[in-house]
Image (cartoon, coloured by chain):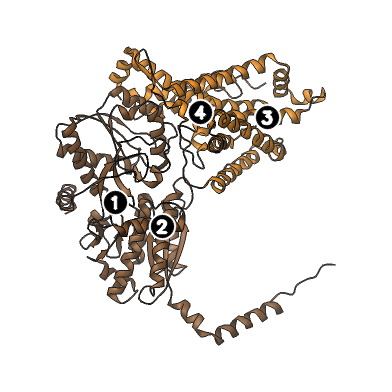
Amino acid sequence: MTRTRKPGVSRRATLAIMGAGAVSFATPWVARAQAKTIKVGMPTILSGRVAQLGTSSRNGVMLEVEKVNAAGGLAGRQIEMVIRDSKGQPQEAARVARELVNTDGCEILIDAEASSGAFAVHEVARDLGVLCLHTNSETSALTADPKQHIPNAFRTARQGVHDSIVGGSYAAAIAKAKGLKKWATCSPDYAYGRDTTGEYVTYLKRFAPDIEIISESWPKLFQPDYTEVVTKILQAKPQALYSCLWGGDLTSYIDQANIYALFSQMEVFAVNMADYTALTVVKNLPKGIHSGNRYIKTYPATPENAAWGDAYKAKYNEYPTNWSWENATAIMLLAEASKKANSADGKKVAEALRGLKIKSPFGADGTVTMRAEDQTLVGYAIGWGTTIPQEPYVPQVQPGDWKTIFELEAEWKKSKGYT
Amino acid sequence: MDLDALTGCLASSACLVTQTTSGFIIGMLLFLVAVGLTLIFGVLKVVNFSHGAFYMFGAYFAMTAYQFSGSFALAMLCGAAGTAILGLIFERVFMSRVYGADVLMQLLVCYAFVLIFDDVVRMIWGPEFKSMGMPAAFQVAPLFIAGGVVPPYYLLLIGVALVAAMILGLGLARTRIGKVIRAAAHNPGMVSALGINTGLIYGGVFALGGMLAGLAGALAAPVRSLTPGMGFSVLIESFIVTVIGGMGSILGALIGALLIGMIRSFGSLGFPLFTEGLMYLFMVIVLVSRPTGLFGKEVA
């Protein structure tokens, strides 16, 4: 015999609803406390080949959110993070961002997308007017291009052009000292690889004009085998090689180039090498690869930075990535700005963020600044050094000079027609 | 286009040796994956879209075995044997249920397992990329043959793949089991009527295919980074190889894989911006002129 249920609300459900109602009437603080939280939405990449981008971004955010909440939250409101997977697809990132604001009631967006997704989320921020902090996109145009500028969007990540200026001047000095005239490049064949390599070469040639690029390779993103690229570079016999391969692609490349003894035949400049994701994975890291700093806890060599790196490691059992510090910085800036504005309101916080300078473990001089004119982060630690196969991996980092960066960045903006 | 670089290379023995071995390395690994694919199609008549997963598992099994034992030989063995067992289980439990079914159903089952296997790897080994590292025995300076650079590890890799190809070819052509497999590919009903357990043959062939892909993964593990989903790009190239060589033909897979290897190797010199395109262009030409592939036979 089967029991049939009459349509309508069951007795059990009615009781449950009444019970819940009674509890919330009896304890009004529960309802009030919930209204006081501020929801911060975060679209990011949590699945697929670059899931590490999302997980280490999330970890960086959560580490700081806990501190902010323990200290009373954003102007008295506890932060509640709502983190969703965009699977690395721009249209999905835009959809998730919109849903976070419209359906979930998020008042602030932390856009932890790669560049492709960041531009899509940027349009959502433009449309909805919600305060948005881009934390991972390093494509310069996102903030440099005045067409992209909106008052409610900020960037707390590095910027490609800054890296190129510092990297170009560092490499040029070595090229002059060692007489490296013939260069080859090998970078992934998509917007980031092409733009970054182009900018790097521009500044390299600017500081050392007699340099010649004799071979270019553009392997596909996520290509499993680089043998033909490695042998092609060996044929060209350059004195130095530049690459902006990253993550698993970079480690594959190093393993494959290693058995051809490529690293003993030329100086190698790999901007994305000095990040723990790559440093700790490569088993036979060659000595003496030149790399830009991404995140290492020994640069800046301050107790604050070391403590931050250790705290992260203690909590998540792995070292932070470049994305971790960029995302942590977003929360640090939000906390300071809301303190300054004495409000968690998006518009007031945005106003307070413009030009805000905060103490930071990641600052070149112990501080970072949200530059008012283009709403992007400046003053962060940026430099180049050479690798060794064990900790601290990059024992000495030669810091970039922010004065030079600002001068050349202004020039670059002019040449692009941005100013 | 940089034809000067290409002709310059063809004129120099050093460049010729380096690029040819480079083509062999790419080709032989691809062959091991593609031959399993083609074998499974030839006998079971299923296009195993989840084949890339066996390559991935082979690499992860090898890395884990290497971490625990420090023995390279054991790592290779674990990579191959582990995927063979996995292939057998996968075929018996899942694939054997969809043999008679619509092609779309087979495709769906395979695709579902592409996602499931990727997630299993993510759960066991984590989402971030890993590296096995080159065994100390092979961390030696590359050899110079006629001025060309040849890493010793790659000689081993090419050797192992060639031996596998020979054993496979001879085994299918000369042994009794080989004959039974060929008969099962041709007329499974008759083979079954003769009292031969076709289920066993199917399971065995699937295990063999999985094992070859696993061996490729294990051999690639010291030089390629390991990530969930790493089988996918290899699978696509394996399909190109089987289309060029002819579905179901082992010799075709070998020739197809070596051709792709050479196209990549020499194409990157002469047509640096069109190396991928060259591969597909070649496939199109083969498809138009010989729709069954270079060594494919008309379907009987």
Q: Which mark is drawn over residue B44?
A: 3
Q: Residues within 10 Å of mark 2 (few under 14, many from 20)?
A: some
Q: Is residue B288 visible?
A: no
Dividing the picture into quadrants, the one containing residue B66 is top right
Question: Which chain is depicted orange?
Answer: B
Q: Are marks 4 and 3 in contact (CB under 8 Å)?
A: no
Q: Chain of mark 2?
A: A
Q: Which residue is mark 1?
A: A299
User: Which amino acid type is shown beneath numbered disc 4?
Assistant: Ile
Asked if badge 1 and badge 4 are on a common chain, one would say no
Dividing the picture into quadrants, the one containing residue A152 is bottom left
Q: Residues within 10 Å of mark 4 (few under 14, many from 20)?
A: many
Q: Are marks 2 and 1 in contact (CB under 8 Å)?
A: no
Asked if badge 4 and badge 3 are on a common chain, one would say yes
Question: Which chain is depicted brown?
Answer: A
Q: Which residue is mark 4?
A: B240
Q: Secondary structure at mark 3?
A: helix
Q: CA distance from mark 4 to mark 3?
A: 20 Å
Q: Secondary structure at mark 4?
A: helix
Q: Secondary structure at mark 2?
A: helix
